[in-house]
Protein backbone atom coordinates (compact mmCIF):
# COMPACT_ATOMS: atom_id res chain seq x y z
CA UNK A 1 0.00 0.00 0.00
CA UNK A 2 2.73 2.46 0.99
CA UNK A 3 4.83 1.68 -2.09
CA UNK A 4 2.08 1.59 -4.71
CA UNK A 5 -0.37 4.24 -3.50
CA UNK A 6 1.60 6.80 -1.43
CA UNK A 7 -0.99 9.56 -1.99
CA UNK A 8 -4.05 7.42 -1.25
CA UNK A 9 -6.38 8.74 1.53
CA UNK A 10 -6.01 5.42 3.34
CA UNK A 11 -2.25 5.78 3.82
CA UNK A 12 -2.65 6.91 7.45
CA UNK A 13 -4.68 3.78 8.15
CA UNK A 14 -2.08 1.63 6.36
CA UNK A 15 0.73 3.06 8.47
CA UNK A 16 -1.31 2.52 11.62
CA UNK A 17 -1.93 -1.13 10.71
CA UNK A 18 1.75 -1.60 9.90
CA UNK A 19 2.60 -0.16 13.31
CA UNK A 20 0.30 -2.69 14.96
CA UNK A 21 2.02 -5.46 13.02
CA UNK A 22 5.45 -4.33 14.24
CA UNK A 23 4.06 -4.10 17.78
CA UNK A 24 2.81 -7.67 17.53
CA UNK A 25 6.22 -8.75 16.27
CA UNK A 26 7.78 -7.32 19.42
CA UNK A 27 9.54 -4.37 17.76
CA UNK A 28 8.31 -1.20 19.52
CA UNK A 29 10.81 1.11 17.77
CA UNK A 30 9.63 0.21 14.26
CA UNK A 31 6.04 0.34 15.52
CA UNK A 32 6.64 3.85 16.92
CA UNK A 33 7.94 5.12 13.56
CA UNK A 34 4.78 3.98 11.78
CA UNK A 35 2.42 5.37 14.43
CA UNK A 36 4.15 8.77 14.27
CA UNK A 37 3.92 8.81 10.48
CA UNK A 38 0.25 7.81 10.63
CA UNK A 39 -0.40 10.82 12.87
CA UNK A 40 1.60 13.18 10.65
CA UNK A 41 -0.25 11.95 7.57
CA UNK A 42 -3.59 13.17 8.90
CA UNK A 43 -3.34 14.99 12.28
CA UNK A 44 -7.04 15.87 12.29
CA UNK A 45 -8.30 12.50 11.04
CA UNK A 46 -9.89 9.63 12.98
CA UNK A 47 -6.66 7.62 12.96
CA UNK A 48 -4.65 10.36 14.72
CA UNK A 49 -5.72 9.72 18.35
CA UNK A 50 -5.43 5.95 17.87
CA UNK A 51 -1.93 6.36 16.44
CA UNK A 52 -0.84 8.65 19.29
CA UNK A 53 -2.21 6.23 21.89
CA UNK A 54 -0.24 3.35 20.37
CA UNK A 55 2.85 5.54 19.93
CA UNK A 56 2.74 6.29 23.65
CA UNK A 57 2.70 2.59 24.45
CA UNK A 58 5.61 1.98 22.08
CA UNK A 59 7.60 4.71 23.85
CA UNK A 60 6.95 3.08 27.21
CA UNK A 61 8.03 -0.31 25.89
CA UNK A 62 11.22 1.35 24.64
CA UNK A 63 11.95 2.69 28.14
CA UNK A 64 10.78 6.29 27.72
CA UNK A 65 8.14 6.70 30.43
CA UNK A 66 8.19 10.53 30.31
CA UNK A 67 7.70 10.53 26.54
CA UNK A 68 4.84 8.09 26.95
CA UNK A 69 3.09 10.32 29.47
CA UNK A 70 3.54 13.39 27.25
CA UNK A 71 1.97 11.64 24.27
CA UNK A 72 -0.92 10.34 26.35
CA UNK A 73 -1.59 13.91 27.52
CA UNK A 74 -1.40 15.08 23.89
CA UNK A 75 -4.17 12.62 23.04
CA UNK A 76 -6.32 14.15 25.78
CA UNK A 77 -5.58 17.68 24.60
CA UNK A 78 -6.10 17.12 20.86
CA UNK A 79 -9.14 14.84 20.95
CA UNK A 80 -10.76 15.43 24.37
CA UNK A 81 -14.10 13.85 23.41
CA UNK A 82 -12.68 10.72 21.82
CA UNK A 83 -12.68 7.25 23.38
CA UNK A 84 -8.89 7.36 23.06
CA UNK A 85 -8.75 10.42 25.34
CA UNK A 86 -10.59 8.52 28.07
CA UNK A 87 -8.26 5.57 27.56
CA UNK A 88 -5.23 7.86 27.71
CA UNK A 89 -6.42 9.36 31.01
CA UNK A 90 -6.82 5.92 32.53
CA UNK A 91 -3.37 4.82 31.37
CA UNK A 92 -1.77 7.98 32.73
CA UNK A 93 -3.32 7.31 36.14
CA UNK A 94 -2.10 3.71 36.17
CA UNK A 95 1.47 4.71 35.38
CA UNK A 96 1.55 7.62 37.84
CA UNK A 97 0.18 5.46 40.66
CA UNK A 98 2.29 2.34 40.16
CA UNK A 99 5.50 3.68 38.66
CA UNK A 100 5.94 7.25 39.93
CA UNK A 101 4.14 7.75 43.27
CA UNK A 102 4.15 4.03 44.20
CA UNK A 103 2.17 4.34 47.46
CA UNK A 104 2.02 1.43 49.87
CA UNK A 105 -1.19 -0.52 49.13
CA UNK A 106 -4.08 0.24 51.48
CA UNK A 107 -6.95 -2.03 52.43
CA UNK A 108 -10.32 -0.55 51.45
CA UNK A 109 -12.27 -3.49 52.81
CA UNK A 110 -14.94 -5.67 51.19
CA UNK A 111 -15.74 -4.87 47.58
CA UNK A 112 -18.29 -3.91 46.32
CA UNK A 113 -18.79 -1.86 49.48
CA UNK A 114 -20.96 -3.59 52.06
CA UNK A 115 -20.90 -7.01 50.36
CA UNK A 116 -19.86 -9.43 53.11
CA UNK A 117 -20.25 -13.23 53.17
CA UNK A 118 -22.16 -13.07 49.90
CA UNK A 119 -20.21 -15.56 47.79
CA UNK A 120 -19.71 -19.33 47.76
CA UNK A 121 -15.96 -19.99 47.83
CA UNK A 122 -14.60 -17.63 45.16
CA UNK A 123 -11.34 -19.09 43.85
CA UNK A 124 -10.75 -17.71 40.34
CA UNK A 125 -11.19 -14.35 38.64
CA UNK A 126 -10.72 -13.20 35.06
CA UNK A 127 -11.77 -10.14 33.06
CA UNK A 128 -13.70 -9.77 29.83
CA UNK A 129 -12.86 -7.39 26.99
CA UNK A 130 -14.60 -4.52 28.85
CA UNK A 131 -12.62 -5.09 32.05
CA UNK A 132 -15.59 -6.60 33.91
CA UNK A 133 -14.86 -9.37 36.40
CA UNK A 134 -15.91 -12.96 35.85
CA UNK A 135 -15.78 -14.88 39.11
CA UNK A 136 -15.76 -18.67 39.55
CA UNK A 137 -17.39 -19.93 42.76
CA UNK A 138 -16.15 -23.37 43.72
CA UNK A 139 -19.10 -24.42 45.88
CA UNK A 140 -21.48 -23.69 43.00
CA UNK A 141 -19.22 -25.01 40.24
CA UNK A 142 -20.18 -21.98 38.14
CA UNK A 143 -18.65 -18.78 36.72
CA UNK A 144 -20.54 -15.50 37.17
CA UNK A 145 -20.28 -12.09 35.55
CA UNK A 146 -20.10 -9.34 38.18
CA UNK A 147 -21.85 -6.19 36.96
CA UNK A 148 -23.20 -3.41 39.15
CA UNK A 149 -22.71 -5.50 42.26
CA UNK A 150 -24.91 -8.30 40.90
CA UNK A 151 -23.93 -11.76 39.65
CA UNK A 152 -25.16 -13.45 36.47
CA UNK A 153 -24.21 -17.05 35.66
CA UNK A 154 -22.19 -17.41 32.44
CA UNK A 155 -20.86 -20.44 30.62
CA UNK A 156 -21.05 -24.09 31.55
CA UNK A 157 -21.57 -25.36 35.09
CA UNK A 158 -18.39 -27.35 35.73
CA UNK A 159 -16.97 -28.51 39.09
CA UNK A 160 -13.35 -28.56 40.24
CA UNK A 161 -11.95 -25.85 37.97
CA UNK A 162 -8.27 -24.88 38.30
CA UNK A 163 -7.83 -22.26 35.55
CA UNK A 164 -10.09 -19.85 33.67
CA UNK A 165 -10.06 -17.01 31.14
CA UNK A 166 -12.79 -15.12 29.29
CA UNK A 167 -12.89 -15.44 25.49
CA UNK A 168 -13.59 -12.37 23.29
CA UNK A 169 -17.18 -13.62 23.01
CA UNK A 170 -17.58 -13.15 26.78
CA UNK A 171 -17.82 -16.89 27.47
CA UNK A 172 -15.43 -18.24 30.13
CA UNK A 173 -13.18 -21.15 29.21
CA UNK A 174 -12.63 -23.51 32.13
CA UNK A 175 -9.89 -26.10 32.73
CA UNK A 176 -10.18 -29.09 35.04
CA UNK A 177 -7.38 -31.34 36.27
CA UNK A 178 -6.43 -34.10 33.84
CA UNK A 179 -6.74 -31.60 30.98
CA UNK A 180 -10.46 -31.30 30.35
CA UNK A 181 -11.24 -27.93 28.75
CA UNK A 182 -14.78 -26.54 28.72
CA UNK A 183 -15.53 -23.75 26.27
CA UNK A 184 -19.12 -24.47 25.23
CA UNK A 185 -21.80 -26.05 27.39
CA UNK A 186 -23.25 -27.96 24.43
CA UNK A 187 -19.88 -29.37 23.31
CA UNK A 188 -18.84 -30.68 26.72
CA UNK A 189 -15.23 -31.30 27.74
CA UNK A 190 -12.38 -31.23 25.23
CA UNK A 191 -9.34 -33.31 26.26
CA UNK A 192 -5.96 -31.58 26.05
CA UNK A 193 -3.17 -34.19 26.14
CA UNK A 194 -0.19 -33.54 28.36
CA UNK A 195 -1.83 -31.19 30.89
CA UNK A 196 -2.58 -32.78 34.26
CA UNK A 197 -2.52 -29.83 36.69
CA UNK A 198 -3.64 -26.63 34.90
CA UNK A 199 -2.31 -23.60 36.76
CA UNK A 200 -3.00 -20.75 34.33
CA UNK A 201 -4.67 -20.13 31.01
CA UNK A 202 -5.28 -17.26 28.57
CA UNK A 203 -5.89 -16.52 24.88
CA UNK A 204 -3.31 -14.40 23.06
CA UNK A 205 -4.05 -11.81 20.37
CA UNK A 206 -3.66 -14.45 17.64
CA UNK A 207 -6.37 -16.67 19.13
CA UNK A 208 -3.97 -19.25 20.59
CA UNK A 209 -4.86 -20.60 24.05
CA UNK A 210 -1.92 -21.04 26.44
CA UNK A 211 -2.16 -23.56 29.28
CA UNK A 212 0.40 -23.87 32.06
CA UNK A 213 0.93 -27.03 34.08
CA UNK A 214 2.08 -27.06 37.71
CA UNK A 215 3.50 -30.57 37.40
CA UNK A 216 4.76 -31.00 33.83
CA UNK A 217 7.67 -28.96 32.36
CA UNK A 218 5.82 -27.67 29.33
CA UNK A 219 3.36 -25.12 28.00
CA UNK A 220 0.48 -26.41 25.90
CA UNK A 221 -0.64 -24.12 23.07
CA UNK A 222 -4.03 -24.75 21.50
CA UNK A 223 -4.28 -23.04 18.11
CA UNK A 224 -7.37 -21.45 16.63
CA UNK A 225 -7.59 -24.53 14.39
CA UNK A 226 -7.96 -26.77 17.45
CA UNK A 227 -4.51 -28.32 17.12
CA UNK A 228 -2.42 -28.58 20.29
CA UNK A 229 1.35 -28.40 20.55
CA UNK A 230 3.79 -28.40 23.44
CA UNK A 231 6.57 -25.91 24.19
CA UNK A 232 9.35 -26.82 26.66
CA UNK A 233 8.99 -24.77 29.84
CA UNK A 234 9.56 -25.08 33.57
CA UNK A 235 6.54 -26.30 35.50
CA UNK A 236 4.58 -23.10 36.17
CA UNK A 237 2.45 -22.09 39.15
CA UNK A 238 0.74 -19.13 37.45
CA UNK A 239 0.42 -17.51 34.03
CA UNK A 240 -0.86 -14.15 32.69
CA UNK A 241 -0.59 -12.31 29.33
CA UNK A 242 1.38 -9.09 28.92
CA UNK A 243 0.63 -6.17 26.59
CA UNK A 244 3.27 -6.89 23.95
CA UNK A 245 2.59 -10.57 23.33
CA UNK A 246 4.91 -11.59 26.17
CA UNK A 247 3.81 -13.65 29.16
CA UNK A 248 4.28 -13.36 32.93
CA UNK A 249 4.76 -16.66 34.74
CA UNK A 250 6.08 -18.11 37.99
CA UNK A 251 7.97 -21.36 38.32
CA UNK A 252 8.92 -23.88 40.99
CA UNK A 253 12.44 -22.43 41.22
CA UNK A 254 11.19 -19.31 43.01
CA UNK A 255 11.48 -17.11 39.94
CA UNK A 256 9.14 -14.66 38.24
CA UNK A 257 9.57 -15.20 34.50
CA UNK A 258 8.84 -12.96 31.54
CA UNK A 259 8.42 -15.22 28.53
CA UNK A 260 8.52 -14.06 24.92
CA UNK A 261 5.74 -14.76 22.41
CA UNK A 262 7.35 -18.15 21.71
CA UNK A 263 7.22 -19.13 25.39
CA UNK A 264 10.96 -18.76 26.02
CA UNK A 265 12.33 -16.89 29.08
CA UNK A 266 13.67 -13.40 28.35
CA UNK A 267 13.75 -12.09 31.93
CA UNK A 268 14.08 -13.85 35.28
CA UNK A 269 13.43 -12.16 38.64
CA UNK A 270 14.23 -14.15 41.82
CA UNK A 271 11.46 -14.09 44.41
CA UNK A 272 12.10 -11.43 47.02
CA UNK A 273 14.53 -9.41 44.91
CA UNK A 274 14.54 -5.76 46.08
CA UNK A 275 12.08 -6.60 48.89
CA UNK A 276 12.56 -6.63 52.68
CA UNK A 277 11.72 -10.35 52.85
CA UNK A 278 11.43 -13.27 50.49
CA UNK A 279 8.56 -15.63 49.73
CA UNK A 280 8.27 -19.15 48.33
CA UNK A 281 5.18 -19.25 46.13
CA UNK A 282 3.25 -17.13 43.67
CA UNK A 283 -0.34 -18.30 43.92
CA UNK A 284 -1.76 -16.11 41.14
CA UNK A 285 -0.73 -13.39 38.70
CA UNK A 286 -2.62 -10.50 37.09
CA UNK A 287 -1.53 -7.95 34.49
CA UNK A 288 -2.82 -4.64 33.20
CA UNK A 289 -2.56 -2.94 29.76
CA UNK A 290 0.42 -0.81 30.83
CA UNK A 291 2.61 -3.84 31.56
CA UNK A 292 2.31 -3.99 35.36
CA UNK A 293 2.26 -7.43 37.00
CA UNK A 294 0.59 -8.20 40.33
CA UNK A 295 1.12 -11.37 42.34
CA UNK A 296 -0.44 -13.07 45.32
CA UNK A 297 2.52 -14.50 47.21
CA UNK A 298 3.04 -16.58 50.34
CA UNK A 299 5.58 -18.61 52.27
CA UNK A 300 8.90 -17.72 53.81
CA UNK A 301 8.71 -14.37 55.58
CA UNK A 302 6.20 -12.66 53.30
CA UNK A 303 2.49 -13.35 52.71
CA UNK A 304 0.79 -10.62 50.70
CA UNK A 305 0.78 -8.85 47.35
CA UNK A 306 3.56 -7.56 45.09
CA UNK A 307 3.37 -5.33 42.00
CA UNK A 308 6.21 -5.52 39.48
CA UNK A 309 6.83 -3.22 36.53
CA UNK A 310 7.27 -4.37 32.91
CA UNK A 311 11.03 -4.69 33.51
CA UNK A 312 10.58 -6.87 36.60
CA UNK A 313 11.34 -4.06 39.07
CA UNK A 314 9.39 -4.20 42.34
CA UNK A 315 7.02 -1.23 42.46
CA UNK A 316 4.68 -1.80 45.41
CA UNK A 317 4.09 -4.47 48.03
CA UNK A 318 2.33 -5.12 51.33
CA UNK A 319 1.88 -8.04 53.69
CA UNK A 320 -1.61 -9.17 54.63
CA UNK A 321 -0.70 -8.48 58.26
CA UNK A 322 0.17 -4.86 57.46
CA UNK A 323 -3.07 -4.57 55.47
CA UNK A 324 -5.06 -5.89 58.43
CA UNK A 325 -6.69 -8.71 56.52
CA UNK A 326 -6.66 -12.49 56.78
CA UNK A 327 -8.07 -15.21 54.60
CA UNK A 328 -7.23 -17.64 51.83
CA UNK A 329 -6.64 -15.47 48.78
CA UNK A 330 -6.38 -17.44 45.55
CA UNK A 331 -6.95 -14.95 42.73
CA UNK A 332 -6.61 -11.25 41.92
CA UNK A 333 -7.23 -8.72 39.13
CA UNK A 334 -6.41 -5.06 38.49
CA UNK A 335 -9.34 -2.68 38.24
CA UNK A 336 -9.39 0.37 35.98
CA UNK A 337 -8.26 2.69 38.80
CA UNK A 338 -5.13 0.63 39.39
CA UNK A 339 -6.53 -1.05 42.49
CA UNK A 340 -6.32 -4.76 43.16
CA UNK A 341 -9.38 -6.95 43.74
CA UNK A 342 -8.63 -10.11 45.75
CA UNK A 343 -10.85 -13.18 46.01
CA UNK A 344 -11.00 -14.56 49.57
CA UNK A 345 -12.28 -18.13 49.50
CA UNK A 346 -12.37 -18.60 53.28
CA UNK A 347 -14.47 -15.49 54.05
CA UNK A 348 -16.57 -15.66 50.86
CA UNK A 349 -15.95 -12.11 49.75
CA UNK A 350 -13.86 -9.80 47.58
CA UNK A 351 -11.41 -7.27 49.00
CA UNK A 352 -10.08 -4.14 47.29
CA UNK A 353 -6.58 -2.75 47.78
CA UNK A 354 -5.72 0.77 46.56
Image (cartoon, rainbow, N blue to C red):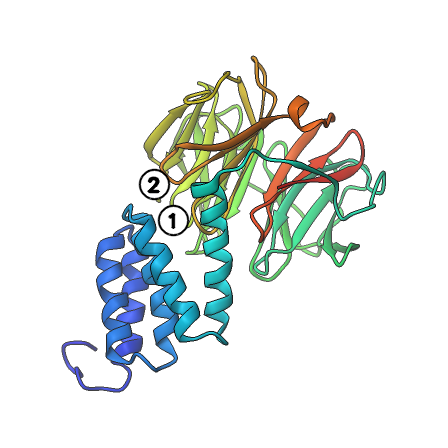
* Secondary structure at numbered mark 2: loop
- Badge 1, how many Cα within 10 Å: few under 14, some, many 20+? some
- Kindly identify which numbered label has been placed on residue 265: none
Q: Residue at x 34, y 67 (%)?
A: 52
Residue 119 in which image quadrant: top right
Q: Residue at x 58, y 51 (%)?
A: 337
Which quarter of the rendering shows the C terminus? Answer: top right
Residue 8 in view: yes
- Contact, mark 2 vs mark 1 (Cβ under 8 Å): yes
**219 or 22: nearer the viewer:** 22
Q: Residue at x 29, y 45 (%)?
A: 63
Q: Could you tell whether 115 is left or right of 218 in the image?
A: right
* Above or below, comparing residue 10 to residue 214 in the picture: below
Residue 351, position as x, y percentages in the image: 71, 39
**177 or 206: nearer the viewer:** 206
Q: Could you tell whether 260 is left or right of 135 in the image?
A: left
Location of mark 1 (residue): 245
Residue 60, position as x, y percentages in the image: 33, 50
Q: Residue at x 70, y 57 (%)?
A: 186
Residue 40 in which image quadrant: bottom left
Instruction: Tell me which label, 2 or 1, sits earlier in the chain.
Output: 1
Residue 289, position as x, y percentages in the image: 47, 52
- Badge 2, how many Cα within 10 Å: few under 14, some, many 20+? some
Q: Could you tell whether 101 is left or right of 164 in the image?
A: left
**186 or 295: nearer the viewer:** 295
Seen as rendered, the residue at the extreme left is 3
Residue 163 in view: no
Distance from label 2 to label 1 (Cα)?
A: 7 Å
- Kindly identify which numbered label has been placed on residue 260: 2
Amino acid sequence: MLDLYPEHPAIAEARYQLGLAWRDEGNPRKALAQFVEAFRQDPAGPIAPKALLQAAEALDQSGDLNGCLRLLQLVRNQAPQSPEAAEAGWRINLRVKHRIFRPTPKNQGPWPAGKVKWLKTPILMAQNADGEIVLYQDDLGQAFLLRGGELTAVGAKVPNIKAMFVAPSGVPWLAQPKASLYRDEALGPVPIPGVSAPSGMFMDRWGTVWLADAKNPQLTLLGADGQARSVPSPALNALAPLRDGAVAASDANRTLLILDAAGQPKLQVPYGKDMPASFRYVLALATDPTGNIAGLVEGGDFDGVVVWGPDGAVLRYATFRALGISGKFRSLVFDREGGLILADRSNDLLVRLD
